[in-house]
Image: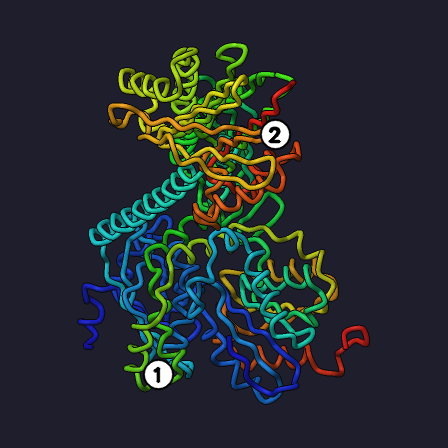
Amino acid sequence: MSGDAWERAPLGLLRLDADGYVVAANETFVGWQPRCAGSQSPAEVPGRRIGDLLTVGGRIYWDTHVAPALALAGSVEAVALEVRTVEGPLPVLLTAATDTADGTAAGTVHVALLAVRERAEFHQELVRARLAAERWADRLHWLQDATAGLSRAAGTAQVRRALVDALSRHPAVAEVRLSHPGDTARATVRRTGASTFEVGVAGAAGSHGVLRVRVHDRPGDLPVDVDALDVIAQQGGVALDRARMHEQSASVAHELQHAMLTVDLPRHPGLRLTAHYRPAEQGLEVGGDWYDAFWLKPTRLAVVVGDVVGHGLQAATAMGQLRTAVRALAVPGRGPAAVVDLVHGFVVDRHVGFGSTLVYGELDLATSRFTFACAGHLPPLHVQALGGCAYCWQGRSTPLGVPAPVVRAQGTIDLDAGDTVVLFTDGVVERRDQSLPEGLNALASAAVAHTASPSWGARLVASDGDARDDACVLAVTWRPVR
Amino acid sequence: MRVLGRAGGPTLVLAHGLGCDQAMWHRVVPLLVDRYQLVLFDHAGSGSAHPGAFDPSRHAALEGYAQDVVELLEDLALGPVVLVGHSVSATIVLLVAAERPDLVDRLVLVGPSPRYIDTDDYVGGFSAAEIDELLATMESNHLGWSRAMAPVIVGNPERPELGEELTASFVRTDPRAMRAFARATFLSDNRADLARVRKPSLVVQCREDAIAPLAVGRYVHAHLARSSFVLLDAVGHCPQLSAPAALVAAVDDFLSPARLSPAGS
């Protein structure tokens, strides 16, 4: 390059020694330099270290990045830095190469600096856009993770834990606490200290507590996204509302069912009546099994076991209505088939408990005759005092609400002294590990061996702790009193 | 991670600083291999470290990088080693020696600075605004180092096509990892950790260093018990590149048997 071309090139050009000291600078570069105090001539460039000609960021970057790269690779290309000039920092792209192939010798470094004022603004915009995109990606990731955690949780205790866990997973978060419900704070994030925040978790019917978040505040931590924290706290409030409502309805259903199942069973010197109920163990909701026993008249006992389709509050109320309907419609002289048919009519007219099943029977104490009708329900088990037992497959008809034949069937069993009739629901005989026929056989064997034992029924409904369905057994043993 | 050099010789674990990778030791490795066993590695988020190694929570502070080194030393199970830390890694190896003195024999601190930002009673060399400016500069250039270094890592600058190949397969430096490392480097204050270290150490200071000025090197020496100080006639922040022979001579001298104290052997 001729002297003139070097001096007036539209690039700042420098020659450095191996330690980065300027040996020569062209006119273009010198023209950028700040003027000396009280003088129009630019500050002397040769003899100064290149770092001192750059802004501080560039100076550090030169020593941590550019100089090592030059030493090892022999060249760098288009590094974005800023030169200190008369008019303030001038953005440049710096390209440099050593004049030895591998940079090992203490050679000269040739530097070209291209002023890129406009280009740098464009570049800055790109950098800002990238940072914004990263922030949004982080925000979405955090929100999505929190939403997934909250939606998987069931019950307020789990939702509270899921909310705390979701916030704790942010890399910058050191500790999260959710205070007790009723503790209140503003439902927008507030900074409470150098590294602490709090936000109230609002619910439709009062506060679910206050989230108190402590961040690590380490140098490399990203700032916590306060807007996302706000949204997660809100989502937590909604999830807790839902969980609370669900638990309330489940608890009402449990109470309803409990009230209906803790009846005083009829007493008589010749009768032994035992009833056992075990709720399902999975999930919060109540099932639909129920039983009842009452006097139609002093010498006629009515017994019933039913299974309402569905779960939860709706099943519990349907159960209550069916139970009341049976009690109201069972009158002396009507007989099981007619009673069941009237209950079926109630189901059709009132749209309650469609598809439910029940077995209803009447024991006449004077004749020791048991008459019964099964609407889609499992048959009664007749356990004989002299040994042996049989399922009674007579008296069967369709489930309640399902169109039935003109006349419903009804069955009869004549009991000998000490015989037992067992009414039960499918939860007793249907287990995950056995088929229905196997279950019926197991029940029959157990009945023959153990009906004399008072804890027999309880053992029947006992489970391995993971029962999916509820189970109900009602056993009537009749020994006429002379 | 690479282990090379004389098996059974004293082990030197070489920890690179911010913005680069183990290629930084390129010029000192040939001068050390015949006498020492050398362990070279890349910090999480740097060079060819596995992209999954960087954990935004663990690596938000220098303690996380120190923990990585502790785990590396436990895996190596080579007994107490000499930790050589350049720049921010000088602080990282100090943290290792403070936490797990059982893993460390001696320390070599090349261009250490326990705090970069000036305070009322301390000169680190930079104002908080200047550090922000550096972080912005890094943000604009985050792809530069790995591209420039690819041929060096392959070790054959005469055949740049190998470098191109490597560059293509090279883990793109994750800007988030780089940003976190830069913030952890320049915004930390580890002055109090100097008093926690009781191992013999060598402070290597360049005559003229814009990143870790002479006063900072002297401060480290003054506050670090059992430390020696050596001033290299070198300019810049990377004597392993600008004055490799002088650096190796200082290390040899520091580790020579004649200088080993009975307690340190």
SS class, disc 1 = loop
User: Residue A184: x percent and y percent?
Assistant: 51, 20
Percent position of residue B129, x then y? 44, 45
> In the figure, residue A82 lies in which quadrant?
bottom left
Q: Position of residue A56 (x, y in %)?
A: 42, 54
Left or right of residue B159, residue A322 in this image: right
**What numbered label is drawn on residue A442?**
none
Residue at 31% in and 75% down? A97
Badge 2: residue crowd in 10 Å (few <14, some 14–19, many ≥20): some
Q: CA distance from mark 1 to mark 2?
A: 102 Å
Say which of A379 and B231 sits in front: A379
| Residue B95 appears left or right of A211 | right
Determine which residue is flagged by label 2: A418
Residue B157's label in the rendered image is: 1
Q: Amino acid at mark 2?
A: Gly
- Image point 39% across, 64% down: which residue? A50
Under tag 2, what secondary structure? loop
Residue A311 position in % (x across, y down): 40, 29
Q: Classify A37 as above or below A330.
A: below
Instruction: Provide the chain ID for the residue under circle 1.
Output: B
The residue most toward the bottom is B34
Q: Residues within 10 Å of mark 1 (few under 14, many from 20)?
A: some
Chain under numbered label 2: A
